[in-house]
Image: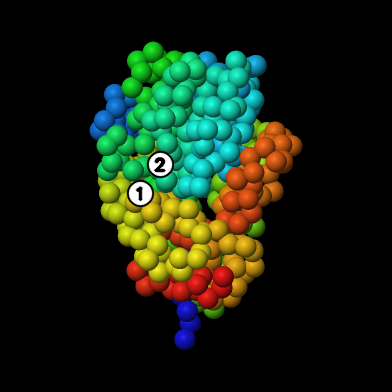
C-alpha cells in the first residue's frame, strides 16, 4: 500500500479557493492590467484594520519590505543599533542593514522568543529600536519588553511574520509602535508573497504613507509567476505519490524558475533582491482577502494539531511550545541529530521542516554578512542545532499528526 507523503511547507495554505482564484486570473490575459493595480489591496487593508482593531494598515509586497518601511518610518538610520533575537531569518537582518543600522543579536528564552534579560544587557546609547518576534506563533514577552523599551526611549516593532492570533486580547501586533505581517507562502495566511504594516500612531502613519508613495509595482511577469504557484503546488502535492508525477512537477518548477524563490541567493549574501520594496499587487490581495476570512478556522486547526503533538509525543522529547496554546506556525521539537531524524522520517514518507537550524536561517546564509558573532547567543545556537519542525497546517489531519508523533517517538 502506498503511504501518502506528509509535507511541512510546499504551499501549506493552498486550498481549492486559492487554486481557482489564481487560475481564473491567469486564464484571462485581457484583464492582466488589473493584476497589479486595483481595489483589492485597499479592501484587504480595511479588513486588517477591523481584524486587529487598529486605525491604520498598509499592504506591501512582503514581510521583509514591511520591516524595512517600519524601520524607516521610525527614522532608524546609519549609526543606530537595532536589537533583534538570534534564531531569526536572514531577511530580517537584511532589512535592518538596508535601513542603515546594525543588528545587535539578543539570546532567546526556552520558548524561542527574545530574552528580556539579555535585551537589558545589550542596550547601549546607540540602541534605537527593538524587534519583538513572535517566533513560530509563540507570543513573546511583549509587556515587559515594551516597558524596557519605553524606559530607555527605544522604538518597538512586533515581527508577526509567524503569528496572526487575532482571537486573543490584545492580539500580537497591537502593542508595539508598529507591527509587520507576512503573507508569504509558508505563513499564517498566504497570498504566495505579501505583507502589511499596522500601527495606531498617527505620526508614524504619515511617515509610512509618504514612504509608500514612491514604491514601484512588482513586474507583471513576477505577478504571473507568483499566481502559477497555487495551482502548480496543488498539482504537485496531489500527485506526489503517483508514480513520481508530483516530484516531476516540483522539479520542473525549480528548473524553469516558475516559482520565485522565497529567499534569493543575493539575499542570503546580505544583498537586496532587486525588486523589493514594492507595492502589493491587486491579484495577490484577492488571494489574501479570501484567506483572512478563513483565519479563525486555520488558527483553530493549528491549535488542535499542536495539542495532538503535545499529547502524543513522548514527554522526553523536548518541545519548547508544549504548553503554548497559540496557533503555532510549525511545532518545534529539539532532537540530538535533526538531519538524521529528518532523513529517517523521509524514508517513512514524512517530510519534516528545517527552518531555523542555524541562528540566522536559512543555513546557507552568509553569517559574516549577517554580522553574527559565534558564542554571543549560546541558547539560540544550541536550540538551532537541534531544531526540527512538525507541520500544523490545514493539510494535516488528526491521523497525520498522530502518524508524525508516533514516527518521532520511534526515531529519538
Ligand atoms: C521572523 C521573520 N520575520 C520576517 C520575515 C519576512 O517575511 P517575508 O517572507 O514575507 O518577507 C520572515 C520570513 O520568513 C521571518 O521568518
The percent position of residue 259, horizontal first and vertical second, equals 55, 51
Per the image, label 1 sits on a secondary structure element best described as loop
Seen in the picture, residue 271 relative to 26 is either above or below; the reply is: above
Give the spatial CA distance, label 1 vs label 2: 8 Å
Q: Is residue 271 left or right of residue 37?
A: right
- Please give the name of the residue rendered at 42% of the width and 46% of the height, measured from the top-left corner: 137
Per the image, label 2 sits on a secondary structure element best described as loop
The percent position of residue 277, horizontal first and vertical second, equals 53, 29
The percent position of residue 30, horizontal first and vertical second, equals 40, 42
Colour setup of the view: rainbow
Seen in the picture, residue 176 relative to 171 is either above or below; the reply is: above
Question: Which numbered disc flags the more N-terminal residue, 1 or 2?
Answer: 2
- Please give the name of the residue rendered at 42% of the width and 30% of the height, measured from the top-left corner: 144
- Please give the name of the residue rendered at 56% of the width and 70% of the height, measured from the top-left corner: 412
Name the residue tied to disc 2. 139
Residue found at the very far bottom of the displayed protein: 1
Is there any visible trace of residue 330 in the rendered image?
no
Q: Residues within 10 Å of mark 1 (few under 14, many from 20)?
A: many
The percent position of residue 111, horizontal first and vertical second, equals 48, 47
Q: Viewer-proximal residue, 169 or 245?
A: 169
The disc label shown at residue 326, or none: 1
Is there any visible trace of residue 152 in the rendered image?
yes
Seen in the picture, residue 66 relative to 161 is either above or below; the reply is: above
- Please give the name of the residue rendered at 48% of the width and 15% of the height, measured from the top-left corner: 153
Q: Is residue 296 left or right of residue 314?
A: left
CB under 8 Å between discs 1 and 2 = yes
Amino acid at each position: 500500500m502506498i503511504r501518502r507523503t506528509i509535507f511541512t511547507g510546499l504551499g501549506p495554505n493552498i486550498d481549492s479557493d486559492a487554486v481557482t482564484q489564481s487560475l481564473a486570473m491567469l486564464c484571462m490575459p485581457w484583464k492582466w492590467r488589473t493584476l497589479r493595480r486595483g481595489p483589492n489591496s485597499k479592501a484587504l487593508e480595511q479588513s486588517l484594520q477591523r481584524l486587529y482593531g487598529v486605525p491604520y494598515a498598509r499592504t506591501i509586497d512582503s514581510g521583509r519590505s514591511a520591516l524595512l518601511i517600519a524601520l524607516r518610518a521610525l527614522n532608524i538610520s546609519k549609526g543606530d543599533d537595532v536589537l533583534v533575537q538570534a534564531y531569526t531569518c536572514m531577511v530580517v537582518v537584511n532589512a535592518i542593514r538596508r535601513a542603515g543600522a546594525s543588528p545587535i543579536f539578543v539570546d532567546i528564552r526556552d520558548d524561542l522568543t527574545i530574552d528580556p534579560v539579555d535585551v537589558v544587557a545589550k542596550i547601549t546609547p546607540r540602541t534605537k529600536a527593538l524587534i519583538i518576534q513572535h517566533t513560530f506563533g509563540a507570543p513573546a514577552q511583549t509587556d515587559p519588553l515594551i516597558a524596557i523599551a519605553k524606559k530607555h526611549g527605544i522604538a518597538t516593532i512586533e515581527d508577526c511574520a509567524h503569528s496572526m492570533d487575532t482571537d486573543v486580547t490584545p492580539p500580537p501586533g497591537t502593542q508595539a509602535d508598529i507591527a509587520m505581517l507576512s503573507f508569504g507562502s509558508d505563513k499564517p495566511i498566504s497570498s504566495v508573497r505579501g505583507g502589511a504594516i499596522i500601527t495606531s500612531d498617527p505620526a508614524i502613519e504619515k511617515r509610512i504613507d509618504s514612504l509608500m508613495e514612491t514604491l514601484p509595482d512588482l513586474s507583471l511577469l513576477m505577478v504571473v509567476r507568483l499566481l502559477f504557484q497555487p495551482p502548480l503546488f496543488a498539482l504537485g502535492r496531489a500527485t506526489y505519490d503517483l508514480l513520481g508525477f508530483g516530484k516531476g512537477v516540483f522539479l520542473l518548477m525549480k528548473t524553469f524558475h516558475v516559482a520565485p524563490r522565497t529567499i534569493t541567493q543575493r539575499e542570503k549574501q546580505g544583498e537586496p533582491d532587486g525588486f523589493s520594496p514594492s507595492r502589493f499587487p491587486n491579484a495577490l490581495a484577492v488571494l489574501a482577502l479570501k484567506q483572512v476570512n478563513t483565519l479563525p478556522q486555520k488558527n483553530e486547526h493549528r491549535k488542535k494539531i499542536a495539542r495532538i503533538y503535545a499529547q502524543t509525543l513522548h514527554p522526553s522529547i523536548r518541545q519548547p511550545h508544549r504548553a503554548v496554546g497559540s496557533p503555532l506556525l510549525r511545532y518545534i521539537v529539539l532532537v540530538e541529530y535533526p538531519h538524521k531524524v529528518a532523513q529517517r522520517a523521509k524514508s517513512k514518507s514524512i517530510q519534516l521542516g528545517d527552518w531555523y537550524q542555524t541562528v540566522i536561517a536559512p543555513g546557507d546564509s552568509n553569517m559574516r554578512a549577517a554580522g553574527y558573532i559565534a558564542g554571543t547567543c549560546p541558547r539560540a545556537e544550541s536550540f538551532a542545532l537541534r531544531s526540527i519542525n512538525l507541520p500544523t497546517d490545514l493539510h494535516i489531519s488528526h491521523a497525520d499528526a498522530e502518524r508524525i508523533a508516533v514516527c518521532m517517538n520511534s526515531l529519538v
